[in-house]
Amino acid sequence: MTRLITTTSALCLLAGAAQAEGTLSVYHWFEYIPQELVDKFTAETGIAVTIDTYDSNEAMLASLKAGRLGQYDVAVPADFMVEIMAETGMLDTFTAEEMPNLPNIAPQWLDVPFDPGRTSSIPYQWGSTSFAVNRDVYAGDISSLGVIFDPPEELRGKINVLDSQNEVLILGSLYLGIPQCSTDRDQLRALSDMLVAAKQHWASFGSDTAKDVMVSGDAAAGMIYNGFSAKARAEGANVEYSYPTEGHVLWMDNVVLLKDAPNRANAIAFMNFLLEPENAAAVTNYAAYTSGVSGVESFLDEAIRTSPENNPPAGAAPGAFAQVCDEETQKLYDAIWINLKK
Amino acid sequence: MAGAAPDSGTSAETTYRSARVPLLLPTWLVIGIFLILPVALMAVYSFLTKEMRGGVIWEFSLAAYDQFFINRGLFGDEPPSLEWTYISVFGRSIAQAATATTLCLLIGFPTAWFIATRPPATRGVWLFLITVPYWVNLLIRTVSLRFLIRENGPLNDALLGTGLISEPLAMINTNFAVQLGLFYSYLPFMVLPIYAAVERYNFTLSEAAADLYASRWVILREIVLPIVKPGIIAGCLLVFIPSMGAFLAPNLLGGAKNFMIGSLIEEQFKRSLGNWPFGAAVSMILMSLVLILLMLYARSMAKTEAR
């Protein structure tokens, strides 16, 4: 009985604290933050957190544009989307004084082109996109993007491709050695023709299923994010992730402070919390990508820290971030994508 | 007596006339808020200028319909010709829906007939069994189907076990899988209306025709089908219309290799393309097609009743 009373009063206190400290509305990717970490934040600060999820950068942008801006405090867009949101005036800024953990950001992620000097975003996780191959099916060389775009006999008809315009067109451009946002007619025609010819060897388009099809064996090779590939391997599939010689796509998800955030101070507290190495490492241990915070190494699981997916071999070709094309150029890439999927 | 009847009629009419507006109000509110307003919004958006990456600029534009019907080449400087890209997406979706409807009719009609001819006490059980899968969300049923038909899934295992096949059948990510998914998803929409029609059918008519030496085929064609026709048409519409806009089965079972009308519209709002006016325009064109279908249905019903 005494224990019950104690628990109840403790709960009341906690509830009271939460009331006093208010709430935080997070707009986040699906399955991208461990619940224990959210609970830890609430326990430390008394701020109650609600999370809504989305499954693509564009879906998040569309929803904010359709009137949800002003309802959320923070969101987690990828690099190019931070740039787009900043251009559309959807982001608020913070000062270095407000964010005491700002120096924890790893030096190479501090002054990034999509948010110079980090005034409205902090790194969440970063990783790469290329492809993985089931080594039980194909034992040959996988150092070229040709495995996806001009596949060997064993893999034809067993390839899953991300259902994402950006990733498919950028990897295709890397394969042909074409710069991003090209307006050169011959280059764009070559890209379009190459993709249409490659499509006959593909079994399916799917982004959120990219890991599952590799684990189940529906696909023997697939475009994939490095964390998904690591998870597929952890689930028992004999997959190897490739860092192709033509290059790969780099991306970084960032927590941004949204304009008109209803709980601005709480949002900054949350971002500051995520910059603690221990907390950043908790996300990495869950999502199997790489944190953008210094000093996380001692908190990482051994398997994550040393995974081949997160540690490109020495001499691997550099990755490229997605570039934001201007409207006229983007139209051409949209047309190539529609033509590919028509 | 002769004078009393019109009197009472008039009084009833007066009663209802004074209450007409409050009685109609709920209906008009529901139709107005949930039907007319969203459709009107869609119609307006389809004639606006697109804002890059989602959203609209409030300036009149025919660009969305132009994109649908006119082809000017990848770089927009070739002489305009008819654009086949989106018409072929519609063609594919319509062909898929038509096949699904035919399959549902071929299996659904005998099923409905079977249930309607059971003793009344057991009919309820059969109907109940038809609706059981509907307790589970469509997405989950579609994903389960994926598990069933995959290369190393139970269906292939069973077939290999019986020795009927020596290599696993490639079923996943094929048109066959999409058809299977649509057929499975919408079969009850075919069975239930046909059942309702067959249940009301007076079987003594068949006996009378048989007594007059009509063959079974003639009975089916000349007597049964005309009478249960409204049920069949209703079933076909209920399967055809959602199949045309379906994108779960094409995406999860067919591998999303080609756009369906549904995924083409989704892509305009949720994905990289972000072209709201075009998405609205495609929706308007789809809705016009469905409306034409429904008007044809209404006309054929009117004809049937007139006969």
Image: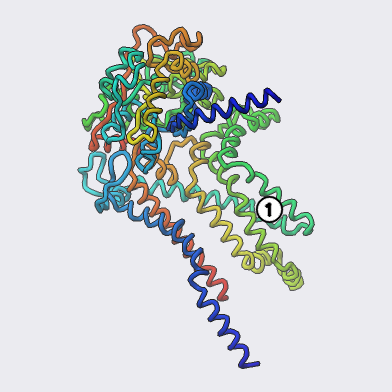
Nearer to us in this view, B270 or B156: B270
Amino acid found under the numbered disc labelled 1 = Thr
Residue at point 27%, 36% (across, down): A88
Residue A220 in sight from this viewpoint = no
Camera-side residue: A207 or B231?
Answer: A207
In the image, B17: left or right of A92? right
- Rendered residue at 68%/56% (across/down): B112
Would you say A110 lies left or right of A163 here? Answer: left
Between A154 and A221, the residue placed more toward the observer is: A221
Tell me if residue B209 comes above or below residue B255 in the rendering: below
Question: Mark 1: which secondary structure?
Answer: helix
Q: Position of residue A86 (x, y in %)?
A: 28, 31
Spot occupied by residue B121 in the image (x, y as percentages of width and height): 79, 57
State the image quarter where residue B292 is shown.
Answer: bottom left
Residue B38 showing in the rendered view: yes
Q: Label 1, on which residue?
A: B111
Residue B25 coordinates in the image, percent (x, y): 49, 66
* Up/down of B296 relative to A294, above or below: below
Q: Residue at x 54, y 80 (%)?
A: B13
The quarter of the rendered structure image containing the N terminus of chain A is top right
Going 36% across and 6% down the picture, which residue do you hit?
A: A314
Q: Position of residue A131 (x, y in %)?
A: 42, 21
